[in-house]
Amino acid sequence: MLGARRREFIKLLGGAAVAWPFAARAQQTALPVVGILFGSSAAANRSLLAGFREDLRDAGYIEGQNVVIEAQWAEGQYDRLPVLAAELVHRSVAIIFANSLPSVFAAKAATSTIPIVFISAGDPVQLGIVASLNRPGGNITGVNFFAVEVASKRLELLIEVVPTVSVIGLLTNPNNPRTDVEIRQLQAAARTVGKQILVVKASGERDFDVAFETLVQERASAVLVPAEPLFFGWREQLVALAARHALPAMYDVREFTAAGGLLSYGLSLKDTYRLVAGQVARILKGAKPADLPILQPTKFELVVNLRTAKALGLTIPESFLLRADEVIE
């Protein structure tokens, strides 16, 4: 009798040990899930994702305790985004954070009910993402990253550093829905100052070498690399190509200059992710996306890498350096 009771007790313990992980998982899956739709890779966004987790924590949402974060990665292959967005919808996530314009369109096509918080590199009203900036309507809100709007300013700053340039390369991804708008804007801006824009295309990492070789063959003496998830994911390779071909380059965010790029001008990605985390937290607390205005940051940062300037044989004017928010020496 005692042996039978002992066996029964051990069996009960074993059953509890097996059941506990399932119970824990069940409890975790009951938590609201924030799905993130990335256009590029996990490696490229590791620090930004870590910062997003910290920003959510500051807003009262701790991963594993009262929220779950699930990221999907397109690795620069935008044709994968609709499938990844559908997976998040099937997962019944509480919110989708679309961190790029291609991700926004994929998420918007996948659901009209799950809240979407986006980062848009172009005017979200003009692009048809929302009805208005103050009252976006529907299930979408987010942050305007102003990438297209400040493209002409980047051109102006690049010319200021390399005033003798006549042909300026523009690296583009034809798969990004805002590419044509940016090309037209930069070509018009370049004509007003007597410069020429040479457009080269890259829809994948395999295209980068040919794109830069084309720039050199066509006598471009500087290059603009715009806001683009694909380019951000391969930023170290692009910076290395610019250095190899001795091309002064202007980028959109400081992560490029930190990797050795010459110049960057644009919004801080870290600050932008903090704003997104705030929007996500408000929605988790019950706010409706339709009632949350599109946030429009106003602080742009100019970053200069003096080590790269020296390697290129460039002298950055003192007046230019005084206007920089950060100088990497």
Image (cartoon, rainbow, N blue to C red):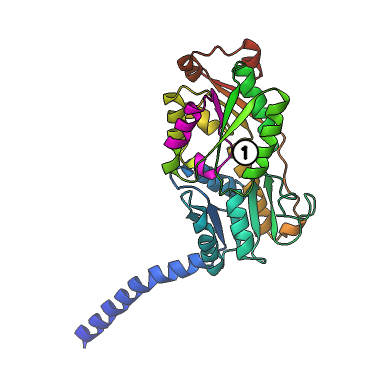
Q: Does residue 323 appear left or right of residue 72 in this picture?
A: right
Which class describes the residues within 10 Å of circle 1: few (<14), some (14-19), or many (20+)?
A: some
**Residue 247 or residue 37, whichever sits in front:** 247
**Residue 145, how many percent across, how many down?**
66, 41
Q: Residue at x 46, y 21 (%)?
A: 246
Task: Identify which residue is drawn at 33% across, 77% down.
Answer: 15
In this view, the residue in front, 26 or 224, is 224
- The magenta segment is 209-231
Residue in the picture at 72% in, 54% down: 128
**In this rendering, would 63 be left or right of 323?**
left
Q: For residue 34: magenta?
A: no
Asked if one can make out residue 242 in the rendered structure from this viewpoint, the answer is yes
Q: Residue furthest bottom?
A: 1
Q: Is mark 1 on a helix, strand or loop?
A: helix
**213 inside magenta stretch:** yes
Horizontal side, residue 88 vs residue 152: left or right: left
Residue 2 lies, with reference to residue 152, above or below; the image says below
Residue, far left: 3
Could you say which quadrant of the image residue 24 lies in?
bottom left
Q: x and y percent of residue 21 in the render?
A: 39, 68
Question: What is the number of callouts on the image?
Answer: 1
Residue 110 sits above or below residue 319 on the image: below
Looking at the rendered image, the quarter that the N terminus falls into is: bottom left
To which residue does mark 1 refer? 271
Q: Quadrant of residue 213?
A: top left
